Image (tube, grey):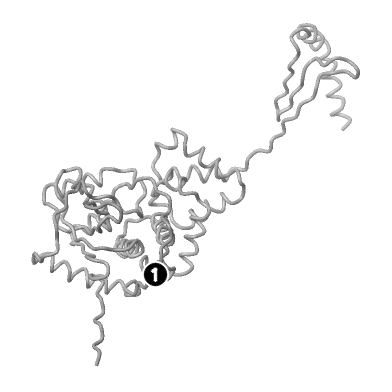
Amino acid sequence: MTKKAPRRSIVASFGALSQTVSEAELERTAPDEAEPQFASPPPRVPAGVIGATQRTLSDIREERDRLQAIVDAGAPGIADIDARLIDPSPFPDRLPDDDPSTFEAFKKSIAEDGQRVPVQLRPHPDQDGRYQVIYGHRRVRVAQELGVPVKAFIRPLSDSDLVVSQGLENASRQDLSWIERAVFARQMESAGVRARDIRGALSLDDPELAKMRSVWRSVPREMITAIGRAPKIGRPRWLELAAALERSEGNVPRALETLSADKVRTQPSDLRFQIVLAALSEAPKASQKTSLDLQAEGRRRLGKASFDGREIRLVVEAESAAAFASFFRKELPALMERFEASQDDG
C-alpha cells in the first residue's frame, strides 16, 4: 500500500515566518527601508499550485511561534552571509519613506543587541554566489551599513513562490500603507500568481483586489513612486485620484509636472498626494485666446491684435508703430464712448 505523502508545512514551503515580540513592535512602528525605484515588471511565469496560501493567518502565527522556538534553541540551518552578496527582492514592496529616523532607531537596536531574527534569502537565479532577499530587507540594509554578516535561512524559491512568501510576511505587518499593498499585489499578478493566491497572501477579498487593480491601471508607477507611501491616504482617496486621472488625457502629464516641482517634492508624501489631487480637481480654464490682423481691406498688414481673457494686446510693425500709437491715442476716447453707448443700448 502506497504511503500518503506528508503535507508540507508553511516553514517547508516558504521558510521562516518569524518575529520576536520586540522586533515585531519595531516592524510596526519603523517602516521597511525605502526601496529603489520600481523596475519593469518581470516576465510572467506560471504561478503553480501554492496551497499554503489557503491557510489562515492563525496557522501562520503558530508556525512562526514554533520557528522562533527552533531559532532560540540554536537549531542548524541558519547561515552567516556576507551582506555585500545580497541583492533586494526583484519585487519591491516598499515605497520611499519621508522619515529616516525610524530606520536609524532600528539600526541602533541591531548595532547594540545584534540581529535576533534571521532573514530569508534565495540563491540568485542568474548570478552564482549571490542571493536575493525574500523578506528582511531592513535587516539586510542594516548589516550592509554596519559591515557585518547577515544571519539567514536560505530557500530556493521560484519567482511566484517568492512573491507569495513575501506577501504572507507582509500580511502580518501593520505598517504597510494601502498603496504599498496595492503595488505589491500588482507585483504578484505580474509574476503570474493567481488571483486567489494573491488574496490569500494579502488577506484580501475580491472587491478589494478589484479596487487595487483600478488604481494601479490608472495611476502610473512613476506617479506612485513620486508620491511615496502616503501612510494616511487610504483606498477612497486613491480611487478618487484614479478617477481624476481618467477624466482627461492631459491629467497624467499635468499631475507628473505638479509632482516634479521642487516645492512639492520636499513635502511629506501625504501632502504630495493632497497637492496633486487638488491640482487635478481644479477645472482647467478654457483657453479664450484669439487674434486678429490689423489690416484694412485691400491694404497692407500693420500688425496683430491678440485677445486672451482680460488681456488685449496690439503688436504693430516697427515702421508703423509710432504713427499707429499716435492715431490710437487720439481715437481711444471716441472708441470708449462708442463702447459705453453699446453697453447702454444692450
Residue positioned 25% across, 47% down in the render: 102
Q: Nearer the viewer, residue 19 or 131?
A: 131
| Apparent side of residue 244 relative to residue 229 in the rendered image (left or right) | right
Q: Residue furthest bottom?
A: 1
| Apparent side of residue 194 relative to residue 169 in the rendered image (left or right) | right
95 versus 326 height, above or below: below
Residue positioned 46% across, 64% down in the render: 209
Q: Mark 1: which secondary structure?
A: helix
Q: Quadrant of residue 302?
A: top right
The quarter of the image holding the N terminus is: bottom left
Residue 146 at x, y = what percent? Answer: 16, 43
33 versus 205 height, above or below: above
Q: Which residue is mark 1?
A: 197
| Apparent side of residue 153 relative to residue 312 in the rendered image (left or right) | left
- Mark 1 surroundings: few (<14), some (14-19) or many (≥20) residues within 10 A: many
Residue 233 at x, y = what percent? Answer: 43, 52
Dot 1 amino acid type:
Asp
The quarter of the image holding the C terminus is: top right
Residue 207 at x, y = what percent? Answer: 49, 67
Q: Nearer the viewer, residue 204 or 330?
A: 204
Residue positioned 53% across, 44% down in the render: 278
Q: Nearer the viewer, residue 112 or 125?
A: 125
Residue 298 at x, y = what percent? Answer: 91, 17
